[in-house]
Image (tube, helix red, strand yellow):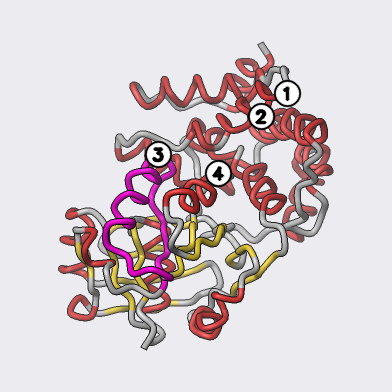
Amino acid sequence: MTRIVVYGAGGIGCYVGGRLAATGAPVRFVGRQRTADVLAEHGLRLTDYLGADLRVAPADVRYETTPGAAAEADLVLVTVKSAATESAAAELAEVLEPGAVVVSFQNGVRNGDLLRERLPDHVVVTGMVPFNVLNRGGGVFHQGTEGALDLQRHPSLAPYVDAFARAGLPLTQHDDILPVQWAKLLLNLNNPINALSDLPLRDELSQRSYRRCLAAAQAETLALLDAAGIAPAQLLAVPMHRFPVILRLPDVLFRRLAAKMLAIDPLARTSMWEDLEAGRTTEIDYLNGEVVRLAESLDRSAPVNAKLVHLIRAAEIKRRAWSGPDLLRELQG
């Protein structure tokens, strides 16, 4: 039977791997001791905005804390934070059998390439998780927004398609994953805004001032992508280049359109908010920081995204909740 390992099993890893395990796939998790302790006591409970409620009993959760647990994996889902990709690749290179399939389910646009470079004897596929997962504590992980799993098309994925479909996580394969990654990154530019607001996603996006902050960050990024010759994929009901216009609409008009664009439930939060809550370093350098790097490669600037990077780095040291008007003034200034 195909052996699946989730490497770096935090929020996304526990949710994706948990749904696979709950629907019959043989899954082993590798991650931190604190998560292992929680799951040993509570097991896993996986819920979503559509009402799904799946469980894996504590005795059935195979969660380990050393790289050697991945040694016999046929499929590895890498879900570590972007800053840990280099070390994860080095650890996997030491233990994986040649030919194992490795999928990067991480934020940013460069992790798949890094894994591919460090794991030349393995099949590395770049993937993307488009939805938000909230760790509610006690082994409960909740998907708060819609979306399927996106991956670069590859024949090595064929044996796993049915297992993901049974888990309610169908795989959408693309001939070119980079436009999809940039489209997701455009949506993730809201992560720092949500984290700084200290509000649930739906509450934050219901306020025009916060949406104008996101519109400014997206418009800046879209101009840079256009200069670089990168056309982001259309992930939702409208093309990405129209998002800034829609975000700037008055609240009443936005609510009407948003209901047709993306399902978000009241529990949804961003992973960056969770990181700040837990006192962890965020992935800001691999989201808005990626926009700043793109601007530098084009000999341009990205002042809005650079400011968001600065504000999140400050928040990693000392939290502050920003109102929409105050944050907008800060970004415009």
Reply yes or no: does residue 301 show up in magenta. no
Of the numbered discs 3 and 4, the one sitting upstream in the chain is 3
Instruction: Name the residue tied to disc 3.
Output: 83
Quadrant for the N terminus, please.
bottom left
Q: CA distance from mark 1 to mark 2?
A: 6 Å
Q: What span is in magenta?
A: 75-99
> Residue 151 vs residue 28: left or right?
right
Amino acid, disc 2: Leu
Residue 214 in picture, x, y percent from top left: 67, 34
Of the numbered discs 1 and 3, the one sitting upstream in the chain is 3
Crowding near the residue tagged with mark 1, few <14, some 14–19, many ≥20 C-alpha atoms within 10 Å: few
Of the numbered discs 4 and 1, the one sitting upstream in the chain is 4
Q: CA distance from mark 4 to mark 1?
A: 17 Å
> Residue 124 vs residue 154: left or right?
left
Q: CA distance from mark 3 to mark 2?
A: 18 Å
Q: Is residue 198 above or below residue 333?
A: below
Residue 206 in picture, x, y percent from top left: 65, 43
Q: From the viewer's perspective, is the residue at label 1 or at label 3 nearer?
A: 1
Instruction: Name the residue tied to disc 2.
Output: 294
Residue toward you, 101 or 151: 101
Crowding near the residue tagged with mark 4, few <14, some 14–19, many ≥20 C-alpha atoms within 10 Å: some
Instruction: Name the residue tied to disc 1.
Output: 298
Amino acid, disc 4: Arg
Reply yes or no: does residue 97 show up in magenta. yes
Quadrant for the C terminus, please.
top right
Instruction: Name the residue tied to disc 4.
Output: 110
Q: Residue at x 44, y 68 (%)?
A: 16
